[in-house]
Image (cartoon, rainbow, N blue to C red):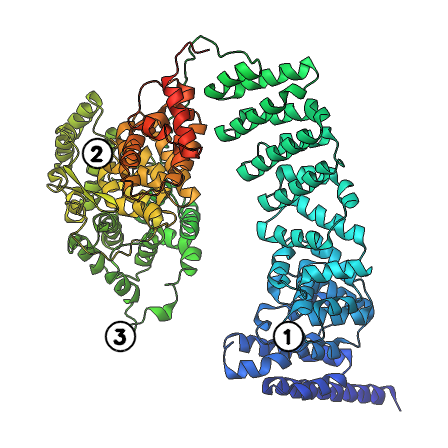
């Protein structure tokens, strides 16, 4: 055979082989499309690695087709076969892992047995690499545990101990589908039990899953682990050490409760507990309440068995006594009493530790500690310890300190009156709104961030002004920069906007015609971006502005429609006559606009020959600073000198006499709400879109239904009227009442913004703060505390008014005393003792009067805590005088917290300056 003939023969053979491979690939792809899994396996078993690789491009094409119709019948039929074939036709471990764990493959996978069959002929090292990569995937990838365990078995590699693998193992062992004996039996049969159990204690987050599976009873996980430990299958010391170490590491309470159950089921002996004394001390000091309580009980048992040296018990006591849980503190003092009663020689070590509680924030704890020290003080053997106890008595409240002078020889309080120094946070500095972004690209980035996560007033106003400026400069440049942002919006798809008339992009405009009130800053920018892209009809925005005063709506409608009217006007001008910039962009983050800056903008409009928009100018008037005397007059003269209608209007606005707060009335049932009369100054001379801001506020008029649920809009509503917070607060008052009356969450987040507003805080503002102080959720109470402190620091807090409001709200059951006590204690802890005393001095007599007459209709739970805060504030500030109805409660029989704290407060108020 010649060389030419041989070459031709080889080429023919190669062509035939290629054709055969192509035919095989076509058959495989056809079997995959048809979902014939058994045929797919048969074809794969007869292929070489090269033939399998040649089939993969066709499988990728099938996958791409199925992605576009994921929920179709064809997709459901083909996916399991595609899953197995794609894994078998790739040779790289990383590629196979990505295929097996792909998002589009999760919902309809091949069975683990099938995948192990098609992959089982690979090299063990390759299989170990695949299982390692699969195990490193997050649990949300839903990689089959049976698949990973099978690959471990085939490869002989060490068992992975990642979160995904261990969680899969937990589900496999404890799942309800398992019918092969008990959990203990299934665990005993597992060849990798020690490694996986160790991982349960080591891997974060596993405890939550174990808690869901643990259950109770003899077949529970915790009981099974304890029994296997008792049988010697698991090493006892390793298990106890792992439990204790996991508790020391901390975590979510639900997770730690599971490991605490394991530890209790292991039932450590007294000697095993003694060997870990340092660990129990650390847990009693810093762990969560449940774990700390267990550690405390272990230490108590060791101490009562004389297995815990007094010095170590003293160290543990000093750590426990300043925990916030009063139950733990009381239990520790009881334990010290028992140990001291058994062994008098421990007094020198234990009494100084007990006396550390003299500085506890709770006076009841101080009194318990003082009684304990007084009872055993005679057992002290050294003068140094006696002196230490006397010195520590200086931390007691005045009434108890006077007692310690007699019983412990403590020094009496100084005869010099102490001058209380009120500590309030500095008033917040106003934040100037930064100039609009210079480049369109920078603007696009800011708008993208605002659409993704929202923003404050300054961020929104800066972006809004920037959008107007760049649209005026170059619409095309702006659109090019915004294109990536627009492409991600839900309204950007072309097929959403073909309405009844082909090619007429009316869908988004029709949507906003039915949703005229914009719900948040993101919806405002959606409207503006869609307008720039021609997605909104140009007639829509103008009609929305003209109709701004139509309808009544709910109590928020005036605020929502005024905000929306301005944005709709901007949208209309973007399509018809872009403005060079906005007049109403505030100077400061509160929404306030400096008068000189507004005059400069009007002058620039005059020089450019730009047309002033009615709502934009009206909003600028509402935001302009008016209360600066000579500077306002000078700005008014400059404005009038412009010779424009808007300049003259601004001049009159700045020099007109400011009207006082509107006439208000209270409506009371369970809630206390405020109604306002009309404000003529906000009704006359303003465009229709803003006139509703001066309309009356009524509790009963208007619709009860309200869909203004987005709390992020409230700060923008405040920026509409930065010098009139009362008008906004009256419309938000029902929302604020829900955090206390209805136990809702989040509405109080607006309170710090309300406190920072530039106008006078009146009746509605104080009621809003009062409701926030009685909120159900801690974060709402903290927001109210922030608002209270800001108002006090700015000189805007009327403590008498706030106290009277709180008294009435507690009487009516709108605010619970226990919640109010937590809030005012937090405020007092910052150093605002005189402020809080001023509030409670007005709130308490109303409540004490009801107690004295037996007509209290409110829950008294927490009233003792409220009196405790009042007493502490009175002691710190040196307040004196009589509090109405206090003696009637203090003279009651018994030792309840209500009675003891009433007595403490009376003592503080009646104490002589030079008391011994």
Question: Does 17 sit above or below residue 86?
Answer: below
> Looking at the picture, how far across and down is residue 550, in whole percent?
15, 55
Q: Residues within 10 Å of mark 2 (few under 14, many from 20)?
A: some
Question: From the viewer's perspective, is the residue at label 3 or at label 2 nearer?
Answer: 3
Left or right placement of residue 118 versus residue 648 in this view: right
Q: Residues within 10 Å of mark 1 (few under 14, many from 20)?
A: few
- Of labels 3 and 1, earlier in sequence is 1
Neighbours of disc 3 within 10 Å: few (<14), some (14-19), many (20+): few
Q: Residue 603 got which mark?
A: 2
Q: Tell me: residue 125, above or below residue 808.
A: below
Counting residues from the start of the chain, the first of labels 1 and 2 encountered is: 1
Q: Residue at x 49, y 30 (%)?
A: 364
Residue drawn at x 57%, y 32% is 322
**Pointer 3 with pointer 2, Cβ within 8 A:** no
Tell me the distance, in whole angstroms, between the alpha carbons under discs 3 and 2.
46 Å
Task: Return the x and y of residue 496 as percentages of the image width and height.
Answer: 35, 69
Q: Which residue is mark 1?
A: 177
Precedes in sequence: disc 3 or disc 2 = 3
Disc ID at residue 500: 3
């Amino acid at each position: 055979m010649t060389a030419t003939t041989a070459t031709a023969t080889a080429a023919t053979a190669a062509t035939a082989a290629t054709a055969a491979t192509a035919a095989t690939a076509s058959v495989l792809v056809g079997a995959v499309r048809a979902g014939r899994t058994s045929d797919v396996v048969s074809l794969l078993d007869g292929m070489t690695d090269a033939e399998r690789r040649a089939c993969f491009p066709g499988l990728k094409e099938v996958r791409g087709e199925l992605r576009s119709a994921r929920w179709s019948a064809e997709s459901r039929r083909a996916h399991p076969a595609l899953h197995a074939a794609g894994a078998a036709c790739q040779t790289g471990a990383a590629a196979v892992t990505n295929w097996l764990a792909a998002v589009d493959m999760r919902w309809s996978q091949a069975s683990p047995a099938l995948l192990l069959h098609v992959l089982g002929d690979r090299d063990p090292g390759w299989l170990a690499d695949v299982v390692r990569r699969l195990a490193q995937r997050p649990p949300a990838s839903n990689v089959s545990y049976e698949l990973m365990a099978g690959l471990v078995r085939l490869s002989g590699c060490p068992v992975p101990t990642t979160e995904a693998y261990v969680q899969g193992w937990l589900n496999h062992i404890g799942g309800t589908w398992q019918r092969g004996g008990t959990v203990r039996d299934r665990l005993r049969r597992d060849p990798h039990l020690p490694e996986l159990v160790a991982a349960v204690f080591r891997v974060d987050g596993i405890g939550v899953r174990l808690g869901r599976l643990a259950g109770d009873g003899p077949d529970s996980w915790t009981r099974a682990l304890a029994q296997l430990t008792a049988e010697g299958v698991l090493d006892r010391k390793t298990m106890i050490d792992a439990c204790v170490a996991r508790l020391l590491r901390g975590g979510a309470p639900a997770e730690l409760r599971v490991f605490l159950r394991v530890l209790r089921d292991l039932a450590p002996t007294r000697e095993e507990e003694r060997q870990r004394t340092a660990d129990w001390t650390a847990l009693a000091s810093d762990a969560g309440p449940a774990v700390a309580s267990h550690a405390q009980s272990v230490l108590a048992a060791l101490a009562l068995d004389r297995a815990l040296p007094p010095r170590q018990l003293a160290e543990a006591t000093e750590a426990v006594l300043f925990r916030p849980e009063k139950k733990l503190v009381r239990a520790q003092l009881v334990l010290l009493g028992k140990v001291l009663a058994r062994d008098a020689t421990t007094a020198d070590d234990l009494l100084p530790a007990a006396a550390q509680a003299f500085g506890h924030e709770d006076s009841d704890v101080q009194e318990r500690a003082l009684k304990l020290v007084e009872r055993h003080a005679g057992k002290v053997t050294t003068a140094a310890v006696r002196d230490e106890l006397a010195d520590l008595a200086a931390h007691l409240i005045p009434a108890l300190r006077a007692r310690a002078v007699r019983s412990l020889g403590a020094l009496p309080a100084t005869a010099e009156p102490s001058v209380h120094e009120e500590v309030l946070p500095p008033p917040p500095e106003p934040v100037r709104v930064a100039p609009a972004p210079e480049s369109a690209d920078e603007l696009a980035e800011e708008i993208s961030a605002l659409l993704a996560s929202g923003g404050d007033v300054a961020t929104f106003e800066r972006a809004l002004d920037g959008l107007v400026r760049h649209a005026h400069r170059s619409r095309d440049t702006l659109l090019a920069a915004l294109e990536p942002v627009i492409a991600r919006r839900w309204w950007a798809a072309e097929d959403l906007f073909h309405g009844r008339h082909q090619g007429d992009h009316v869908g988004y405009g029709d949507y906003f015609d039915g949703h005229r009130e914009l719900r948040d800053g993101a919806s405002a920018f959606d409207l503006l971006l869609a307008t720039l892209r021609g997605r909104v009809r140009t007639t829509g925005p103008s009609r929305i502005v003209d109709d701004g005063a139509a309808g009544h709506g709910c109590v928020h409608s005036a605020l929502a429609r005024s905000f929306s009217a301005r944005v709709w006007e901007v949208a209309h001008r973007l399509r018809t006559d872009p403005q060079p910039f906005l007049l109403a962009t505030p100077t400061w983050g509160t929404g306030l606009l400096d008068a000189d800056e507004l005059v400069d903008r009007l002058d620039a409009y005059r020089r450019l020959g730009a047309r002033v928009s009615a709502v934009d100018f009206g909003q600028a008037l509402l935001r302009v600073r008016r209360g600066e005397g000579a500077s306002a007059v000078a700005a008014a003269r400059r404005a009038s000198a412009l010779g424009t209608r808007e300049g003259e209007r601004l001049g009159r606005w700045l020099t007109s006499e400011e009207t006082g707060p509107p006439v208000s009335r209270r409506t009371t049932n369970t809630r206390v709400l405020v109604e306002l009369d009309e404000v003529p100054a906000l009704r006359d001379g303003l465009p229709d879109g803003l006139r509703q801001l001066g309309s009356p506020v009524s509790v009963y008029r208007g619709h009860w239904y309200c869909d203004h649920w987005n709390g992020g809009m409230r700060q923008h509503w405040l920026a509409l009227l930065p010098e009139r917070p009362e008008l906004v607060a009256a419309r938000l008052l029902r929302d604020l009442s829900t955090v206390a009356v209805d136990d809702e969450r989040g509405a109080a987040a607006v309170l710090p913004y309300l406190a920072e507003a530039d106008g006078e805080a009146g009746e509605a503002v104080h009621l809003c703060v009062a409701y926030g102080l009685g909120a159900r959720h801690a974060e709402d109470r903290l927001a109210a505390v922030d608002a209270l402190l800001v108002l006090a620091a700015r000189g805007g807090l009327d403590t008498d008014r706030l106290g009277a409001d709180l008294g009435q709200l507690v009487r009516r059951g709108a605010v619970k005393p226990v919640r109010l006590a937590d809030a005012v204690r937090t405020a007092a802890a910052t150093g605002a003792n005189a402020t809080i005393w001023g509030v409670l001095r007005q709130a308490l007599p109303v409540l004490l009067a009801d107690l004295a007459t037996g007509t209290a209709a409110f829950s008294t739970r927490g009233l003792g805590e409220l009196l405790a805060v009042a007493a502490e504030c009175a002691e710190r500030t040196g307040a004196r005088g009589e509090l109405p109805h206090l003696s009637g409660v203090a003279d009651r029989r018994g030792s309840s917290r209500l009675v003891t704290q009433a007595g403490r407060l009376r003592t503080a108020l009646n104490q002589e300056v030079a008391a011994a």
